[in-house]
Image (spheres, rainbow, N blue to C red):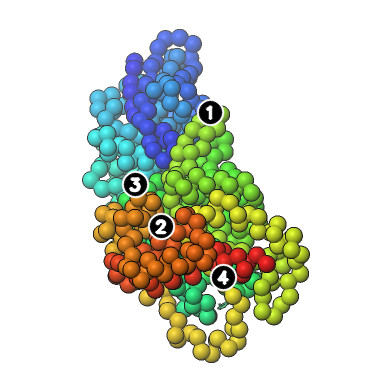
C-alpha cells in the first residue's frame, strides 16, 4: 500500500519541499530509505521502529521502501522522522490517507515516541504557508518560533500518540497563543552614560549606527574601546518585522533558538574571539552552518583586538562586506547565507599598545609597529567608513565632572531612530541605509552646498583622498546631515566626516 506525506529540507536559510512516499510490499521484511538521504536520515529507521513499537504499533512483516523526493536534493537531519512515521502508519492503514499530502510534518522522534524540537522550523513554516498547504505539524518545543508566522494553521505536538489521535479526529491539540513582548528584549544592563570622556567616540558611534557605517577604533589599553563597543546594542534601532524574520531564520537553521529565546527580536551583537577559524567566521563545516558574519545579520559584528585575527579570516570578510551575503562551496554542497552587518573593529596602535601615548613610552621597534599594522592595509580597511582615535583620558578628574553632561543611550537611540526614519523615507526601504549607497546613488543623494564643496576640494588636495575615501566621506556626511534633518550637506557635516578619517593622515600614524 502506497502512502505520501510532506516535509522540508533546509538549504541555506530556505526550506525545500520533500515528498515522502512509503510503499509496503511482500518481500523480505526490512526498511530501505532511498532518495539521497545522509547518514542521519538512515539512522531514523531505528528511531521510528522503536518509537512505533513503544506506542503500540507493530511493523508488518513486509518490505518497506521509503522514498524521499526529489531524489537530486540533498537531505540531512533528523527532522524527517515524523513525516516518515506518519506515512508508514498511513501505509499500514492505521491512519487515514486522505488529505495527508496537504499537511507537512517536521520533528525528530525519541525512542519512546516523544517529539523533539528540530532546526529550521521557521523557514519550513514560511514555505508551507507560501505553498498553501493545509497545515504544518511541528514539535511543541518549536511552537513559539513558528508563532512569528500569522494566518496559517500550525499544530504543536509533544508525542506521536497525540498526532495519531489528531489525524483520526479523536483529539485536537491545544495551540497556546504567544504574545510577543518586545519591551522585554530591550532592557540592557549597560549604558553609554557610564563611559567617561570619549565624547568624540560616542558621537562617532551615534553617527555610525544612524547610517550603518563600519568603524575602526585605535587606542592604547584601558581607554574604553571594548566598553564602548559593548554598549552599541543599547543604541541600535528596533528591527522591522522582515528583519526579525530574516535573522530568526538564520538562528533557526543554526539550531540556536531555545524555548527561552525563540526568536531574534533585537539586533544581534556578535563578538567572536580572535582565535576563530575561517569556517567559524564565514560558515561551512561538514554540514552547512551559518558563521559569525551571518549570525550578525542585521546587527553588529565586533572584532576586538583586530590585528590578532588570522589573515585568512580577515580576508574572508571581503565578500560579506561587499555583497551582504556569503556563498560557501564545499565538495558536496553550495549554500548562501545573508550577512549584512555593521563591522566594528578595535585595536591598539602597536603591539605594546603605547605608540603615540602622551606619557608612557612605546617599547616597539619601527619594524614591529609596521608588522602589527600590516593587516590594516588592504581590502577590509577600505570598507571601513569611520576611523577613530580613542585617546587615554584622566579618569580620576572625569569621574567628578563628566557623568551629568554626557548623553545616555536612550537619548542617542532616539536620535538614531529619527535619522533612520529619514533614510527609510528617502530610499523607500528599511533595508537601504546611507552606508550601503552605491556610487551612482551617492551622486544623487549626497548634494553639497557651495561652501561644503569648496571645503571638500581643499581637504582632498591636502590629504590626497582616493575616490573611495571621498565616497566614504560623502556617505558619512549624509548621515551627519540626516541627524540634523538637513537635506543639503553643509560644510560642518563634511568637516566632521573628515575628522573620522584619521588613517588618511599619515603623519599621525606612520612616522
Ligand atoms: N572612558 C572610560 N570611562 C569609564 N571607565 C573606563 C573608561 N575607559 C576605561 N574604563 C575602565 O577600564 C576598563 C577597561 O576598559 P576597556 O576594556 O574598554 O579598555 P580597552 O580600550 O578595550 O583596552 P584594551 O586595548 O586593553 O583592550 C573598563 O572596564 C572600565 O572599567
Ligand atoms: Mg579591549
Q: Residue at x 61, y 70 (%)?
A: 508
The earlier-in-sequence mark between 2 and 1 is 1
Q: Disc 3, disc 4: CB below 8 Å?
A: no
Q: Residue at x 45, y 81 (%)?
A: 406
Could you tell me how far apart the alpha carbons at marks 1 and 3 are, in whole angstroms? 30 Å
Kindly state the secondary structure of the residue where label 2 is placed. helix
**Whole-percent x, y for residue 247 in the image:** 40, 50
Q: Which mark is drawn over residue 146?
A: 3
Q: Which residue is mark 4?
A: 389
Q: Residue at x 52, y 70 (%)?
A: 228
Q: Disc 2, disc 4: CB below 8 Å?
A: no
Residue 37, relative to residue 277: is it above or below? above
Question: Which of the two residues, 25 or 197, is positioned nearer the viewer here?
Answer: 197
Q: Disc 3, disc 2: CB below 8 Å?
A: no
How packed mark 4 is, by other alpha carbons closer than 10 Å (few <14, some 14-19, many 20 or more), is: many
In this view of the protein, can residue 252 be seen by the observer?
no
**Whole-percent x, y for residue 497 in the image:** 44, 67
Residue 20, relative to residue 15: is it above or below? above
Could you tell me how far apart the alpha carbons at marks 3 and 2 are, in whole angstroms? 32 Å
Residue 344, relative to residue 44: is it above or below? below
Could you tell me how far apart the alpha carbons at marks 3 and 4 are, in whole angstroms? 45 Å
| Count of numbered circles in the view | 4
Q: Quadrant of residue 487?
A: bottom left
Kindly state the secondary structure of the residue where label 4 is placed. strand
| Viewer-nearest of discs 2 and 1 | 2
Q: Which mark is drawn over residue 435?
A: 2
Could you tell me how far apart the alpha carbons at marks 2 and 1 are, in whole angstroms? 36 Å
Amino acid at each position: 500500500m502506497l502512502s505520501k506525506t510532506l516535509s522540508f529540507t533546509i538549504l541555506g536559510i530556505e526550506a525545500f519541499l520533500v515528498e515522502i512516499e512509503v510503499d509496503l510490499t511482500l518481500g523480505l521484511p526490512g526498511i530501505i530509505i532511498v532518495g539521497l538521504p545522509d547518514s542521519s536520515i538512515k539512522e531514523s529507521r531505528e528511531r521510528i521502529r522503536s518509537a512505533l513499537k513503544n506506542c503500540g504499533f507493530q511493523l508488518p512483516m513486509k518490505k518497506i521502501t521509503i522514498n524521499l523526493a526529489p531524489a537530486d536534493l540533498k537531505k540531512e537531519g533528523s527532522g524527517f522522522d515524523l513525516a516518515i512515521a506518519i506515512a508508514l502508519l498511513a501505509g499500514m492503514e492505521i491512519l487515514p490517507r486522505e488529505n495527508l499530502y496537504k499537511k507537512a510534518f517536521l520533528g525528530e522522534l525519541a525512542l519512546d515516541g516523544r517529539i523533539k524540537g528540530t532546526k529550521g522550523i521557521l523557514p519550513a513554516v514560511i514555505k508551507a504557508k507560501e505553498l498553501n498547504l493545509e497545515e504544518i505539524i511541528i514539535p511543541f518545543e518549536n511552537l513559539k518560533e513558528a508563532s512569528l508566522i500569522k494566518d496559517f494553521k500550525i499544530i504543536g505536538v509533544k508525542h506521536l500518540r497525540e498526532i495519531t489521535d489528531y489525524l483520526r479526529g479523536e483529539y485536537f491539540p491545544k495551540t497556546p497563543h504567544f504574545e510577543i513582548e518586545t519591551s522585554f528584549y530591550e532592557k540592557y544592563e549597560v549604558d553609554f552614560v557610564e563611559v567617561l570622556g570619549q565624547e568624540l567616540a560616542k558621537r562617532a558611534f551615534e553617527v555610525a549606527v544612524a547610517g550603518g557605517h563600519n568603524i575602526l577604533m585605535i587606542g592604547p589599553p584601558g581607554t574604553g574601546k571594548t566598553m564602548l563597543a559593548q554598549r552599541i546594542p543599547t543604541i541600535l534601532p528596533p528591527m522591522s518585522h522582515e528583519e526579525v524574520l530574516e535573522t530568526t531564520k538564520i538562528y533557526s537553521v543554526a539550531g540556536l533558538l531555545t524555548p527561552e529565546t525563540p526568536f531574534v527580536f533585537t539586533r544581534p551583537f556578535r563578538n567572536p574571539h580572535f582565535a576563530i577559524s575561517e569556517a567559524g567566521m564565514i560558515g561551512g563545516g561538514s554540514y552547512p552552518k551559518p558563521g559569525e558574519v551571518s549570525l550578525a545579520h542585521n546587527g553588529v559584528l565586533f572584532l576586538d583586538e583586530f590585528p590578532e585575527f588570522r589573515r585568512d579570516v580577515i580576508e574572508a570578510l571581503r565578500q560579506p562586506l561587499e555583497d551582504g551575503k556569503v556563498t560557501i562551496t564545499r565538495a558536496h554542497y553550495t549554500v548562501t547565507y545573508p550577512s549584512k552587518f555593521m563591522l566594528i573593529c578595535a585595536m591598539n596602535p602597536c603591539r605594546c599598545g603605547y605608540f603615540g601615548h602622551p606619557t608612557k613610552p612605546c617599547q616597539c621597534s619601527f619594524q614591529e609597529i609596521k608588522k602589527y599594522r600590516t593587516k590594516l592595509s588592504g581590502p577590509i580597511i577600505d570598507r571601513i567608513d569611520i576611523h577613530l582615535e580613542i585617546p587615554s583620558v584622566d579618569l580620576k578628574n572625569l569621574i567628578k565632572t563628566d557623568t551629568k553632561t554626557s548623553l545616555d543611550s536612550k537619548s542617542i537611540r532616539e536620535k538614531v531612530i529619527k535619522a533612520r526614519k529619514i533614510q527609510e523615507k528617502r530610499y523607500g526601504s528599511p533595508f537601504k541605509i546611507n552606508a550601503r549607497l552605491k556610487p551612482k546613488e551617492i551622486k544623487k543623494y549626497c548634494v553639497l552646498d557651495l561652501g561644503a564643496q569648496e571645503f571638500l576640494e581643499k581637504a582632498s588636495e591636502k590629504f590626497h583622498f582616493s575616490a573611495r575615501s571621498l565616497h566614504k566621506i560623502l556617505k558619512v556626511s549624509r548621515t551627519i546631515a540626516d541627524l540634523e534633518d538637513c537635506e543639503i550637506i553643509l560644510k560642518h557635516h563634511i568637516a566632521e566626516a573628515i575628522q573620522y578619517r584619521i588613517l588618511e593622515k599619515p603623519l599621525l600614524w606612520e612616522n
